[in-house]
Image (spheres, rainbow, N blue to C red):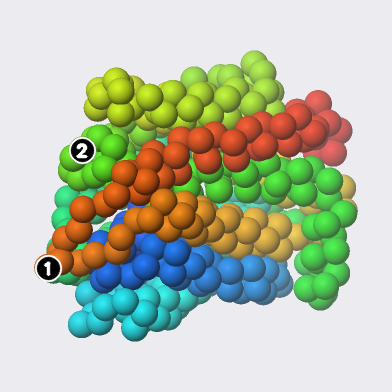
Amino acid sequence: MIPATPGRVPTGVRIGYAVGSFCTANFAAIPGLLLLIYMTNVLAVDPLLAGVVVFLPKAWDLIANTLIGQWSDRTVSRWGPRRPWMLAGTAVLPISFALMFIGPPLKGVPAAIFVGLVFLVAATGYALYEVPYKAMPAEMTHDYHERTALLQWRMVFIAIAIAMSGVLAPMLAGDTIEGYRLMGIVFAVILLVAMIGSFFGTANAPYTGQQDSEGSLRVQLAAARESKPFLWLLGLCSAQTLAAGVMLAGAPYFAAYTVGDPKATTTLFAALVGPMLITMPLWVWLARVLDKRGAMILSGLLFMSGAILALASPLLGPIYAHLCIVVVGVGYAGLQLLQFSMLADVIAYDGQVSGKRRGGVFTGLWTAVESAVAAFGATIYGAVLSIGGFLESDPANPVVQPDSAVTAVLIGLTVIPALIILSGVLMTLKYDLSADKLAPAVT
């Protein structure tokens, strides 16, 4: 890495950094989208147990991510403080991801235990990579708006990766063990290529050379708790992530039992990510005009509106359902861009005010909470299905779901995430780290 200037990050570095988003988005989206239905409809796991299995490995991240954040803050190497840890994650995640969907000759509780243990290893590999990866933007530039522009590239790659996750992954998986096995192998290769690409693509990234890290984990966690902007941002983004996690877990069920076509998972995802590819420049502009907080509120309201409108999908049909998801997608695009841009602001602000390098701890806590909250979305959706009487099955023994389960599928995808995202909008009103407040700290 080279010393940073206050200005623009080179285009090559932007693209090299953004390539890593193929790892971020695919690992976040595919388990969130397919792991629950893989267990309930292929491995015959009870929906509530399946939801718990999706969540527990991510709960481990609450410990692992904070430790990795601390270690990367304190790392000194010719590759910089972050990239050695990214390489370690590259050695773990792709293999364990393939094993998650290998299709063991197990059903019910034994199958759930196997998937849960392998998912735990995969989550650890993801933490090794993702925590330092997210800390890097705050160390590439001091400029408030340059960080948004830098992350705009990342969001374009995330949109492409989510499209791959939502279109290619369900297409490969189908509803058979063989399909899920093929999907796991294909995406393990994609993860490997993306992670190696970002490692080499950030070799010449600018580096601001922030000051020495805090000495102990307890001190760093205390510092994070003392950062009011970080705590408010963590809270509001956790609500957003939880809402998205619920919707992600429910998408295949919504396609199969509300829209009436399991293959509609791919077109629903196209409706979600299409706006992300198109509206990123608009959200960058809105972040300047409304400031990031105002743009975040607007994006949350759009997300919530689309979710509520989707409640009428059984009456108004598949086209209407897809249009509602487009509205959700426009809001989701803004949320994704602004979350990471605002996190970089919080890290930079803390570094300038405190004179300490705590980006790794901030992103460690962030990634741990984000991962756990997103996975908890599947637990919530699994609980809603269980309350509705959803019946687990496998391809050799299909079942007809009761009306109460079909209703639960719809409520879980619409009303529940809408209420959660509303709480995020209300918390956004308390976030006060604007461009004007940040400017004095960086001059």
Q: Is residue 240 above or below residue 178?
A: above
Q: Which mark is residue 396?
A: 1
Q: Residue furthest top?
A: 289
Residue at figure coordinates x 60%, y 40% from the top left = 420
Q: Is residue 325 above or below residue 241?
A: above
Amino acid type, mark 2: Gly
Quadrant placement of the N terminus? bottom right
| Residues at marks 2 and 1, CA–CA distance in whole angstroms | 20 Å
Q: Which residue is mark 2?
A: 260
Residue 30: image x %, image y %?
Answer: 35, 56
Residue at figure coordinates x 30%, y 23% from the top left = 315
Amino acid type, mark 1: Ala
Q: Secondary structure at mark 2?
A: loop
Q: Secondary structure at mark 1?
A: loop
Image quadrant in which you'd find residue 272:
top left
Q: Is residue 424 visible?
A: yes
**Mark 2 burial class by Cα count in 10 Å: few <14, some 14-19, many 20+:** some
Residue at figure coordinates x 47%, y 76% from the top left = 120
Image quadrant in which you'd find residue 432:
top right
